[in-house]
Image (tube, rainbow, N blue to C red):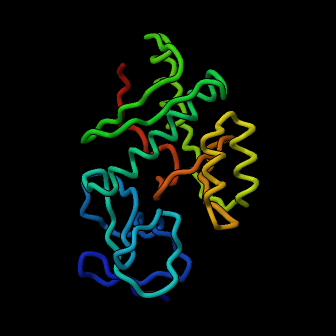
């Protein structure tokens, strides 16, 4: 059994219980559903399994760090929607984020109808609760994947990585590299608007 401190209260859980499982069993003082959690001051995704006694602090969208993770998840969801609707030839570039907005450049002409279709596809994916999985890949396999999917810039970045393995995230049938953590599935990404 593992002792966990949340908001100065001690709870007991079985070893291997996920943070998601903990969040469903303990009353949390959050305005939104939890997105990630600090485990002894280290941020972890909700799929993280408890291994030892620790202190937990769950974070929702009202936390700056969790909000950045939410934005990263939205970018992945947007990439998936565009890829599903139009194919891998349709690329975007994330330019910067401003407060709670993300500026994105498209390498294709976009119309109101396309924007509406992308929004609807994203909301459909949210309703399907598609898992966002972290996976470890050989560097050469990741490079090959990005080369085959017309992302030579990303493939070329692996030439400068000294590790043999890289961490990728998988959403349905696409893989991508993101620095940091991710929401555990698409149902957590239900608050957004698209404009151009």
Residue at 52% in and 49% down: 185
Front residue of this view, candidates 9 and 138: 138
Front residue of this view, candidates 77 and 7: 77
Residue at 51% in and 18% down: 117
Residue at 24% in and 63% down: 29
Q: Is 61 on the left-hand or right-hand side of 144?
A: left
Expressed as whole percent of the image width and height from the top left, the position of residue 124 reads 53, 30
Establish if 122 lies above or below 75: above
Query: Total number of numbered labels?
Result: 0
Q: Quadrant of residue 158?
A: bottom right
Expressed as whole percent of the image width and height from the top left, the position of residue 138 reads 73, 61
Expressed as whole percent of the image width and height from the top left, the position of residue 26 reads 35, 70
Establish if 182 lies above or below 193: below
Establish if 21 lies above or below 178: below
Residue at 47% in and 63% down: 46
* Image quarter (top left, top right, bottom left or bottom right) of the C terminus: top left
Establish if 171 lies above or below 108: below
């Amino acid at each position: 059994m593992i002792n966990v401190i949340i908001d100065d209260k001690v709870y007991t859980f079985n070893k291997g219980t996920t943070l998601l499982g903990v969040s469903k069993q303990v009353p949390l003082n959050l305005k939104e559903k939890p997105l990630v959690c600090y485990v002894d001051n280290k941020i972890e995704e909700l799929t993280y399994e408890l291994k030892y006694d620790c202190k937990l602090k769950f974070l929702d969208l009202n936390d700056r760090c969790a909000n950045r993770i939410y934005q990263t998840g939205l970018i992945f969801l947007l990439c998936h929607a565009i890829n599903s609707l139009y194919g891998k030839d349709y690329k975007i570039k994330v330019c910067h984020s401003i407060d709670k907005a993300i500026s994105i450049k498209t390498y294709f002409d976009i119309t109101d109808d396309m924007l509406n279709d992308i929004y609807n596809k994203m909301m459909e994916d949210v309703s399907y609760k598609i898992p966002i999985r972290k996976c470890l890949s050989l560097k050469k396999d990741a490079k090959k994947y990005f080369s085959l999917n017309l992302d030579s810039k990303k493939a070329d970045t692996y030439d400068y990585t000294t590790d043999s393995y890289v961490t990728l995230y998988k959403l349905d049938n696409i893989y991508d590299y993101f620095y940091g953590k991710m929401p555990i599935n698409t149902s957590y990404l239900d608050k957004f608007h698209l404009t151009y």
